[in-house]
Image (tube, rainbow, N blue to C red):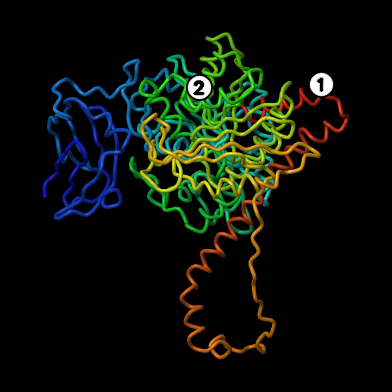
Amino acid sequence: MKFAVTEDHLLVPRSARGTFTVSFDGAYVWSFTTPRDGRRRPGGWRVDWPHELQRRLRGTALVTLEDEDATVFERTVTFRGESAPLTFTDKAGHRLAVDKMGHVTRVFSETDDDMRTHVVEGTRRALADLRADGYDAHLSYGCLLGAVRDGHLIGHDSDADLAYLSPYTTPALVIGESYAMERALRRRGWELVRMSGADLKLFHPLPDGRNVQIDVFGAFHVGDTFYQLGGRSGTLPRTALTPASTVTLEGVELAAPADPDAVLSFLYGPSWRTPDPAFQPDEPAAGMRRLEGWLRGVRADVVPWNEFFRDHREELPRDGSDFATWVHDRVPAAAPVADLGCGLGRDTAFFARRGRDVLAFDIAGVPVRTTRRRLVRQGGDFGAARTLALNDRRSVLIGGAELARTTEPVNLYARQLLGCLDAEASDHLWLLASMALRRGGRLFLEFSAGQGPTPEPDLLLRRVDPDEVVAGITARGGVVEELVVEPGLDFLDRPDPRIARLVAHWPQPGETTDERTATPTVAIETTETTDAPPEGTPMKKKYGARRYLAETVYLPKRILDLEDAVMENRQLNRRLAELTDILAEVLVPATERDEAKLGELIERYRAESLAP
């Protein structure tokens, strides 16, 4: 097999192993490693184009593949039968590339010296602000690697990386420290988003209109093990990290770990001095499970949703949906509506045009900003579109408090939101509804139900079991009034054979639940064995061979159940930190029972802790 390039993939001979860079017309586009990124084919490996790159392959370009030593393929390739030049640029004409996370962006090799100076200045400012506020911050990952190698930003990189060493050894306290850091940075004027319990992404504006992203990763020890967000865990002493040393990046002296060589060996392995644009870390599975349990889960799908809305903006329906019309006809004329998971604001704008007071919530920045612009163009309130992260209990409690304080009882509206949520976020949605609807109002849901084709966008939406929805609402004290499953329209207004519409309410204080809509209690009989075998008795002797074999068959499932229970216990760290933060920042000051002050506290907490 020879090297080959097609519209869908590249073919690499089996003997060709290592890292390869791909260029279009002499400009870096992407890198990959075989056999890691390939699938075995007779005589070699098939390496698929990254999805975000593949869908842009339209036109003709000189495609070059290079390994560490030489050019292995160079040929003019026509994609999709179009002879026009292939343009892989942004709207301003700047060349784009695929970064290490698979996102299409502008990398540093396609950024001029002046822009790189501004990137490093933003990095310097972030480090200075963090260290002034008492956080032991330093360069990390690609920025540290480039500084130590040759003093420059790495060409195939696209963002800046910082880390800070926490003095805490309990994950709940590490998370609480990160919440305080977020508020401190916002007060200093930074725009940022929270990516996990101890991972912030700062945005530094550049003169060409772009924002460079500066990641701030939490790092901490638990026992003898060191953990750093970004998936790293293992053995690294505190003395390798603190007190800070300095390195020079693009001519600017910046804070670095105490022993940069030791830290880079920990992050990238012993061959870190050799450039590898396709590097992927070998992240310890046990450490990843712990980090996922302790710190992850808040904004896992934010980047994919932002990319989807940004890249498909012109293709998405803009007018109000059929479900919005259905709900509008059922809700009293003066009643406000809160659009949960508002997307680009099509239904928010629909309700606003019909004279309703409307609030809009979404987890991702692109939808929130777009909806704000639509509301302002219609004469509405810029602040009516807000962030809501349903995996973050702080966000849910603040959102619930805001909705419970509207002048008139609010109605909650969520079209295709449920298919985006995991079990924790779904339960938080019912918690939000139970807070917001105790004065009246209803919950209106539409979602792709049961079995059927995978809803679009694939990998971001799933089908939902209506019985699970009813059970979740009932468990939080709600009452389902109506549930209909019939053919309808999906997220993209395409036909879907099974669309569910559900209406629910929460009884007001003193109200008795109608027995006709109450969910019956199901009793399940269980039998316990009370006679324990003598100590040291083998299971086989007590149960007999057949019972012993049956228990052995179910052992893998019991191990999985045990892993789920351990993960649940780890997640308590984040939940404890969330509740402690709300208690300290809002509930304790609110004990004075001053309504105006409570409103100010909620507004300030949203601005400093939850803003997009």
Rendered residue at 43%/23% (across/down): 116
Q: Residue furthest front?
A: 516
Image quadrant containing the C terminus = top right
Q: Is residue 548 left or right of residue 93?
A: right
Q: Is residue 570 above or below residue 92?
A: below
- Label 2, label 1: how many angstroms apart (C-alpha)? 30 Å
Residue underneath mark 1: 596
Q: Nearer the viewer, residue 113 or 320?
A: 320
Residue type, numbered disc 1: Ala
The image shows residue 325 at horizontal and vertical percentages of 51, 23
The image shows residue 187 at horizontal and vertical percentages of 67, 23
Rendered residue at 60%/15% (across/down): 382
SS state under label 1 = helix
The image shows residue 176 at horizontal and vertical percentages of 69, 41
Rendered residue at 58%/46% (across/down): 470
Quarter holding residue 316: top left
In this rendering, which labeled residue sits more in front, label 2 or label 1?
2
Residue underneath mark 2: 345
SS state under label 2 = loop
Q: Nearer the viewer, residue 341 or 350?
A: 350
State whether residue 132 appears in this view: no
Which is more N-terminal, label 1 or label 2?
2
